[in-house]
Image: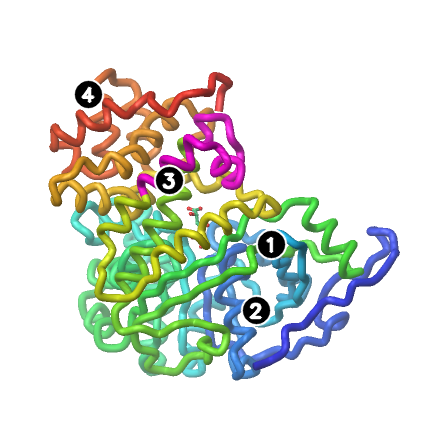
Amino acid sequence: MSAPLEAAPSATLPAGGLPRLNRQLRPVPKAPVRIVHLGLGAFHRSHQAWYTQQASDSADWGIAAFTGRRPDAAVVLAEQDGLYTLVERADEGDSFTVLGSIVEAVDGADLERLTTLVAAPETAVVTLTITEAAYGLGADGQLDVNAPDVAADLARLGSGGGRPATPLGRLVLALAARRDAGSGPIAVVCCDNLSNNGTVARQGVAGFARAWDPGFATWIDANVSFVSTSVDRITPRTTDQDLAAVREACGYRDESPVVAEPFSSWVLSGDFPAGRPRWEDAGALFVADIEPYENRKLWLLNGAHSLLAYAGQLRGHTTVAEALADPECRRAVEAFWDEAETNLPAAVDLQVTAYREALLSRFSNARIAHNLAQIAMDGSTKLRMRAVPVLQAERAAGRTGAGAALMIAAWMDYSAAATSFQDPLGGDVAAANRLQGTERTKALLAVVDPALSGDDGVVALLEGLCGTVAGHSAPL
Ligand code: CS2
């Protein structure tokens, strides 16, 4: 295993006089690009880039990472030759490591570079962190080709030479270049928090391809392996204080450090027809059936996060650690976990008791300052993975599912109270909130799951739970 590159604590230099982090200051070798990543953000850098650097064959595996909507993250990182500091923030203190597995940081709009790299025979893997909402699937699980951004991209692709703007549209264009170059099979690895995320990515990419050129969709079926993964590492947004902490501890200026908890996990399932780094050297787990691991993580970790994000903010809290310290929120989390746990498969030893205990301690890491407002975003998509399956399973078993329903009820209350509410279906949520009583509850539920909104028992349950997360009068 390659040794992590520890930043040397040093320097009493004034901040302004500090040298900038780059490959001259830290001569980290630059591996050739064999991985293309879409969605250059903090999570990619604390997770997949970290695993790649820890692999024993890291010298062979460089990452070219493309941004999403804005070029900013690529600009800052490119100024540092892709280098950045990973601050691992434990209860006991911080440790600082320079990561260098990202060898190119590129504006996502640079389609020439994207197609060149994806078409190159050396490129073996495309990883994705493009957010849950970006897969554009309708309620039937297929790509919604009528969604405005998808339709616009299809028109651009159809015109030949048009420049797609969504991550999937760009990926499809780049995969077509790979087919044309005859560079052979490749793996697409979805690293967004979705159940069955490999299948979701397949539906999205194949749906785009089919609507553009059915022959190309056949090539995708035969040549692109969609790997499912469950990814985990709590990575809050970097703050100015974090930049100062790096300057202070490392004696250089890093304009783009990443802060994460020490814990990390990656479970993967699927084929890598053109090879992959030895991520298992850093603890990644390769399994045949990923669903139990996915559900454990999506329900227990992400579900609790969403519950705390809505209930916690309604009760006046700002961070995960603060919300969990509130006995009412803690009780709600435990009640939801009890329901979720009952519905996890017993066949695989998921060590749920230990997992729950570990989560309590990870969430209580007050030094991490994980903002509830950050987690609250895109709730309509997130609740579909985090609350709905547990609610449905509980009701199918003849129980109420009140623990899971409270997450949805708190989201409903929050959607009406929040001054800044961010969601891909924000317009529908606002329209629903202009209705009253049962009509409002039904309309809000329909945004999350249209089928559930026809279930009078669930609607009544939610109506009873709305407004019960008491306690806060100031505007959110
Ligand atoms: C969080 C996740 O923002 C959110 O929705 O629940 O980003 C969570 O922190 C990660 O999945 C942890 O691995």
Mark nearer the N terminus (2 vs 4) = 2
Q: Along the line of sight, which residue is nearer the eye, 274 or 239? A: 239
Q: Along the line of sight, which residue is nearer the eye, 342 or 430? A: 342
Tag 4: residue type? Answer: Glu
Q: How many marks?
A: 4
Marks 2/3 in contact by CB < 8 Å: the verdict is no
Judged by depth in the image, the label closer to the viewer, 2 or 1, is 1
Magenta-tinted stretch:
312-336
Tag 3 residue: 333
Residue for point 52% across, 83% down: 57
Local SS, label 1: strand
Judged by depth in the image, the label closer to the viewer, 1 or 3, is 3
Q: Is residue 201 left or right of residue 26?
A: left
Q: Is residue 453 magenta?
A: no
Q: Residue 397: x percent and y percent?
A: 12, 44
Marks 3/4 in contact by CB < 8 Å: the verdict is no
Local SS, label 3: helix
Local SS, label 2: strand
Judged by depth in the image, the label closer to the viewer, 2 or 4, is 4
